[in-house]
């Protein structure tokens, strides 16, 4: 069994659990490059559960089946018997544990389903973004486009498709609590650029999410203390947009490319909107390379 010693359970909002792992010095899943460590645990990652009575919505199934099984056991011990899984997007650190919920409804937007289908053989073989493999890759059983609604007990939850970070994002909107589960559409302390060609679209889509007027934002990659305390304030969206614009200016501003990341995001750091985390300096350097390679 995978070491779950550092998997923390938090309750940022009443009725919401965060299952958080990573940001632990020296913690590694395996020696050598692998997506569990390099894209997830090194930055810290959370999956979420919104629960009411005997029902729960699981937002992403974490980095390994053992993590997902732990999530399931925790909720079953609270009396949950019916699970609905929602996948935020197709990247491996968000879909890896879905086998633990293979008997449940698994919801994804059509783009996510298409990506999973296209890459299924490689994901199961461990050749898509490398090891470890996800085998079997459990596929969505319910597909939506644009917007969908689910009921979890007495709760009404909206699923909203977006093109931010990846072209297949799904965010979860609990309007009654003004709570946005953001997946990878926003991160602390900067967004991870997977699709640099889409930055203009990402900006427009982030602006669209502002229209929801969330009171709290819970990203999948963020600081555990902030998540545990209730999540991020709405300015996280503005900080993400500002950073994307900085990346775009780097194409023509040579000096900006060498400016240290803490200087580039000094204002949201000073305001407490974001919390500095050193490994994101490497993410920023990679972002710069990807933007310049267009």
Image: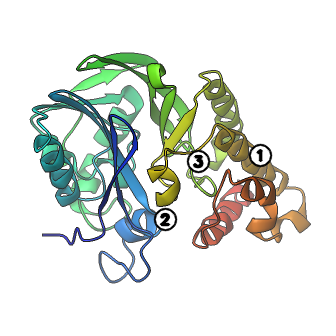
Q: Nearer the viewer, residue 251 or 224?
A: 224
Does 281 appear above or below 119?
Answer: below
- Viewer-side label of 2, 3: 2
Element on which disc 3 rests: loop
First in sequence, mark 1 or 2: give its number.
Answer: 2
Q: Which residue is painted at 36% across and 82% down in the image?
A: 32
Q: For mark 1, does the 10 Å Cα neighbourhood hold few (<14), some (14 to 19), or many (20 or more) residues?
A: some
Q: CA distance from mark 1 to mark 2?
A: 21 Å
Location of mark 1 (residue): 242
Location of mark 3 (residue): 195
* Residue 33 rendering spot, x and y as whole percentages: 39, 77
Location of mark 2 (residue): 43
- Labels 1 and 3 touching (C-beta < 8 A): no
First in sequence, mark 1 or 3: give its number.
Answer: 3
* Residue 2 rendering spot, x and y as whole percentages: 18, 70
Q: For mark 2, does the 10 Å Cα neighbourhood hold few (<14), some (14 to 19), or many (20 or more) residues?
A: many
Residue 7 sits in which quadrant? Answer: bottom left
* Residue 266 rendering spot, x and y as whole percentages: 79, 60
Left/right of residue 240 with respect to residue 35 in the rendered view = right
Residue 282 sits in which quadrant? Answer: bottom right
Q: CA distance from mark 1 to mark 3?
A: 17 Å
Residue 174 sits in which quadrant? Answer: top left
């Amino acid at each position: 069994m995978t070491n779950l010693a550092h998997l923390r359970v938090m309750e940022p909002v009443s009725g919401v659990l965060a299952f958080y792992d990573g940001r632990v010095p020296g913690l590694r899943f395996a020696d050598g490059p692998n997506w569990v460590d390099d894209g997830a645990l090194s930055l810290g990652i959370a999956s979420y559960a919104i629960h009411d009575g005997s029902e729960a919505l699981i937002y992403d199934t974490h980095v390994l089946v053992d993590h997902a099984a732990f999530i399931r056991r925790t909720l079953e011990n609270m009396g949950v018997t019916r699970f609905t899984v929602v996948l935020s997007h197709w990247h491996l650190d968000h879909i890896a544990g879905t086998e633990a919920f293979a008997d449940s409804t698994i919801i994804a937007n059509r783009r996510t389903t298409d990506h999973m289908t296209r890459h299924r053989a490689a994901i199961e073989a461990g050749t898509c973004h490398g090891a470890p493999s996800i085998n079997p890759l459990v596929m969505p059983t319910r597909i939506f486009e644009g917007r969908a609604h689910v009921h979890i007990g007495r709760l009404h939850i909206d699923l909203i498709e977006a093109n931010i970070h990846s072209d297949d994002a799904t965010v979860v909107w609990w309007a009654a609590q003004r709570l946005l589960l953001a997946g990878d559409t926003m991160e602390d302390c900067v967004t991870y650029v997977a699709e640099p060609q889409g930055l203009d679209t990402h900006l427009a889509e982030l602006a669209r999410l502002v229209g929801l007027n969330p009171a709290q934002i819970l990203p999948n990659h963020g600081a555990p203390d902030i998540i545990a305390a209730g999540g991020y304030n709405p300015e996280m969206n503005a900080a993400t947009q500002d950073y994307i614009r900085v990346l775009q200016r780097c194409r023509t501003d040579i000096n900006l490319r060498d400016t240290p990341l803490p200087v580039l995001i000094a204002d949201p750091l000073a305001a407490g909107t974001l919390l500095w985390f050193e490994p994101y300096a490497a993410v920023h350097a990679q972002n710069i390379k990807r933007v310049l390679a267009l």
